[in-house]
Amino acid sequence: MAEFWETSFRDRQEMWGWEPADSAIETVELFKKNGLNKILIPGFGYGRNAKAFIDNGFKVAGIEISKTAIDIAKEHFGASIKIHHGLQVQCRLTKTCMMAYSVIL
């Protein structure tokens, strides 16, 4: 799977553009309403859906298996977003880890 996504992002770069999906935009309002402001996004990609949250003041981190997608995101967002590379992160679903985020998408 990692090879598929790496090839996809390498060949097609920003394949979905930068406009967040409607579901991401709707989720922003839901999270704001419920006071959820720290988000971990597995499958971060290059950050097009994360952009909706970032633009609304959320603290966002991501997990992504494609190094190319991470590089694109870093070009766009700079060092303001932490993106973990790989299928897993060291932070297990422990109470301490879960308390670091309001929600994991």
Image (cartoon, rainbow, N blue to C red):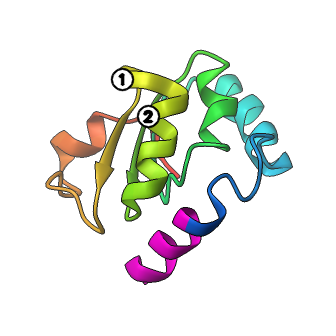
21 and 8: which one is in front? Answer: 8
Q: CA distance from mark 1 to mark 2?
A: 6 Å
**Mark 1 or mark 2: whose residue is earlier in sequence:** 2
48 displayed left or right of 4: right
Q: Position of residue 43 (x, y in %)?
A: 49, 60
Q: Residues within 10 Å of mark 1 (few under 14, many from 20)?
A: few
68 and 103: which one is in front? Answer: 68
Q: Is residue 6 above or below residue 48?
A: below
Is residue 37 in sight in this rendering? no
**Residue at position x 49%, y 32% in the image:** 75
Contact flag, marks 1 and 2 (Cβ < 8 Å)? yes
68 and 93: which one is in front? Answer: 68
Q: From which residue to which does the magenta span run?
A: 1-10
**Amino acid type of the residue that numbered disc 1 sits on in the rendered structure:** Ala
Q: Is residue 10 above or below residue 76?
A: below
Element type where label 1 sits in the image:
helix
Q: Quadrant of residue 90?
A: bottom left
* Dot label at residue 4: none
Q: Main secondary structure of the magenta part?
A: helix
Element type where label 2 sits in the image:
helix
24 displayed left or right of 102: right
Q: Position of residue 51 (x, y in %)?
A: 64, 32
**Residue at position x 50%, y 52% in the image:** 44
Q: Position of residue 3 (x, y in %)?
A: 41, 81
* Dot label at residue 74: 2
**Residue at position x 76%, y 56% in the image:** 16
- In the rendered image, residue 89 lying in the magenta stretch gets the answer no
Q: Residues within 10 Å of mark 2 (few under 14, many from 20)?
A: some
Furthest toward the top, the residue is 57
Is residue 5 in sight in this rendering? yes
* Dot label at residue 79: 1
**Amino acid type of the residue that numbered disc 2 sits on in the rendered structure:** Lys
